[in-house]
Image: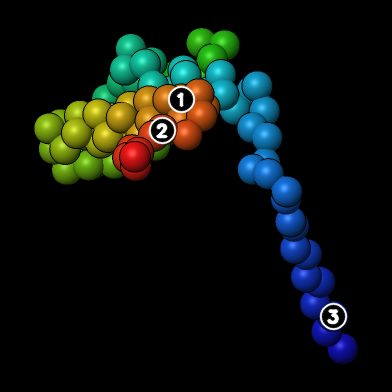
Amino acid sequence: MTYFYYKTNTWNSQPQISEETINLWKHLADKTNWRIVQLPNGYYQTEYQDIEKDNWYDVTRRETIKGAEQAIDGSVEHYTKRVDFLKGPKVVKTFK
């Protein structure tokens, strides 16, 4: 016999983001914390350095170094937007 467990969450407001997650986003939004390494198979791997500067974590693999750099630029842009949205919603249009 199989039992399934379902869990739902509801919030009255948006879930609160931990300080650890915010610090990681800020860290990943800085391009100096990224690097590109070439793998033995000829592909290029993008990696980011952890906050404690101990380890590097692989993120994506690309065929060209240009593609790897574009992937890093996209990631930096993504995390920069996340950090910006922590300041609150942006007004995009007002009516009079």
- What kind of element bears circle 1? helix
Q: Residue at x 78, y 70 (%)?
A: 6
- Residue 90 is marked as 2
- Residue 83 is marked as 1
The answer to which image quadrant residue 5 occupies is bottom right
**Which is nearer the eye, 30 or 91?**
91
Q: Earlier in the sequence, mark 1 or mark 3?
A: 3
The mark lying in front, picked from 1 and 2, is 2
Q: Residue at x 46, y 30 (%)?
A: 85
How crowded is the residue under tag 3: few (<14 C-alpha within 10 Å), some, or many (20+)? few
**Which is nearer the eye, 63 or 80?**
80
Residue 55 can be seen in this image: no
- What kind of element bears circle 3? loop
Amino acid at the residue labelled 3: Tyr
- Marks 3 and 2, how far apart in space? 44 Å
In the image, taking residue 57 as reference, residue 93 lies left or right, namely left
Indicate the position of residue 56 as horizontal and vertical percent values. 45, 22
Q: Is residue 92 above or below residue 25?
A: below
- Marks 1 and 3, how far apart in space? 41 Å
**Which is nearer the eye, 23 or 42?**
23
Determine whether label 3 and label 2 are within 8 Å by CB. Answer: no
- Marks 1 and 2, how far apart in space? 13 Å
In the rendered image, the quadrant that contains the N terminus is bottom right
Amino acid at the residue labelled 1: Val
- Residue 3 is marked as 3
Indicate the position of residue 15 as horizontal and vertical percent values. 67, 41
Indicate the position of residue 16 as horizontal and vertical percent values. 68, 35
How crowded is the residue under tag 1: few (<14 C-alpha within 10 Å), some, or many (20+)? some
In the image, taking residue 66 as reference, residue 9 lies left or right, namely right
